[in-house]
């Protein structure tokens, strides 16, 4: 398994000589495996490792034992250890998030804090093939587009995921063979969280009753979709430069040439509009295909027609252009207008 992961790291250009790496270690099988993978690579790449453990304030004494376990592991192997404790249920309630989402935010905040304080250049997390398959199914059930169905990328910005090439069973077999201990988080066995339901009910059923290779098949399909998404991104970027103009006097306003836009395939049209909305909003969290279609519908409407969108954005039909812009603050209303 170590050779398989090592090859995957090389194929995806994850490591360079002298990298300083933050490793998220919960104490579970996946993160402990990731820890030992990096121990094997320390000399080969001259790595400096910093382990971050996050206590989510959910499981009381069990969580404290997890922290002690990871601390002991780091002490044994002389690796820097940083522990962060946060009250995730309280944070989730205050910010109106699920505990899953709040926990994820807390973890990455802790990783990036260590990253900055120790002049690191990589953050390694322990997502594996099963995590990827679960994420793909989650996005599928929520009605995601190709990007969401492309799965978890091997690397993104400073984040690397060396275990994405192996399934959870391979990880557990490796740890058992090497007699490496790890913590079993009982919350992962419960079905309070959506991801756990997908793991224990949907994906488990698919493997047992439909195809034992379901995890590999799902992630292989996602990899093909990722290639398609990469091609689309390049095509959309090229077309965007020809069709979309930023208002010289206002960086919060863009004009899309109707003549040039309608020459493109509908997939590219939607991609250009989505890209424009992402620039104006800073993200696409609350923007869906419905909003993109509202703008496309303006192409067939009279000059002067407009539609209101999330984040105080509006689209207006002009004679030769569709203008997409941020509304003036005084014109923005507190209620949703779509």
Image (cartoon, helix red, strand yellow):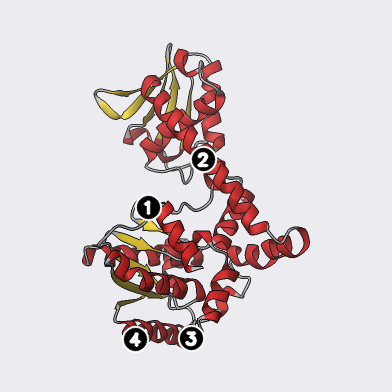
- Pointer 4 residue: 76
Mark before the other along the chain sequence, 2 or 4 = 4
From the image, tell me which residue sits under label 3: 62
Q: Quadrant of residue 92?
A: bottom left
First in residue order: circle 2 vs circle 1: 1
Label at residue 227: 2
Front disc: 3 or 1: 1
User: Quick check: marks 3 and 1 in contact, CB under 8 Å?
Assistant: no
Nearest to N terminus: mark 1 or mark 4: 1
Left or right of 210? Residue 230 is left
When the figure is inspected, residue 298 is found, relative to residue 232, above or below; the finding is above
Res. 13 mark: 1
Say whether disc 3 or disc 2 marks the residue closer to the N-terminus: 3
**Cα gap from disc 2 to disc 4, whole angstroms:** 42 Å
Say whether marks 2 and 1 touch (CB < 8 Å): no
Q: CA distance from mark 3 to mark 1?
A: 37 Å
Q: Left of 72 or right of it: where is 186?
A: right
**Image location (x, y in percent) of residue 213:** 68, 59
């Amino acid at each position: 398994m170590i050779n398989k992961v090592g090859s995957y790291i090389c194929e995806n250009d994850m490591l360079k000589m002298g990298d300083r790496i933050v490793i998220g270690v919960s104490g579970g099988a996946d993160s402990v495996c990731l820890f030992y993978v990096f121990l094997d690579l320390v000399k080969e790449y001259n790595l400096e490792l910093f382990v971050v453990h996050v206590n989510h304030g959910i499981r009381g004494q069990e969580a404290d034992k997890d922290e002690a376990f990871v601390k002991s592991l780091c002490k044994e192997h002389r690796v820097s250890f940083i522990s962060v404790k946060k009250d995730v249920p309280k944070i989730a309630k205050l910010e109106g998030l699920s505990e899953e989402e709040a926990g994820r935010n807390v973890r990455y905040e802790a990783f990036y804090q260590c990253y900055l304080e120790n002049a690191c250049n990589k953050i390694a997390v322990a997502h594996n093939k099963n995590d990827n398959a679960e994420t793909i199914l989650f996005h599928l059930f929520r009605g995601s587009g190709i990007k969401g169905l492309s799965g978890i990328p091997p690397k993104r910005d400073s984040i690397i995921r060396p275990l994405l090439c192996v399934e959870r069973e391979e990880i557990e077999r490796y740890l058992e063979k090497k007699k490496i201990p790890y913590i079993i988080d009982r919350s992962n066995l419960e079905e309070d969280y959506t991801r756990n339901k997908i793991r224990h009910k949907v994906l488990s059923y698919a493997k047992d009753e439909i195809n034992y290779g379901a995890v590999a098949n799902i992630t292989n399909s996602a990899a093909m979709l990722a290639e398609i998404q990469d091609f689309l991104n390049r095509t959309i970027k090229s077309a965007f430069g020809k069709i979309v103009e930023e208002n010289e006097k206002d960086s919060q306003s863009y004009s899309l040439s109707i003549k040039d836009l309608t020459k493109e395939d509908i997939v590219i049209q939607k991609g250009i509009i989505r890209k424009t909305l992402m620039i104006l909003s800073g993200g696409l969290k609350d923007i869906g295909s419905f909003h993109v279609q509202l703008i496309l519908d303006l192409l067939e409407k009279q000059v002067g027609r407009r539609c209101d969108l999330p984040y105080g954005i509006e689209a207006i039909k002009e004679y030769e252009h569709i203008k997409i812009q941020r509304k003036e603050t005084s014109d923005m209303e507190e209620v949703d207008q779509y």
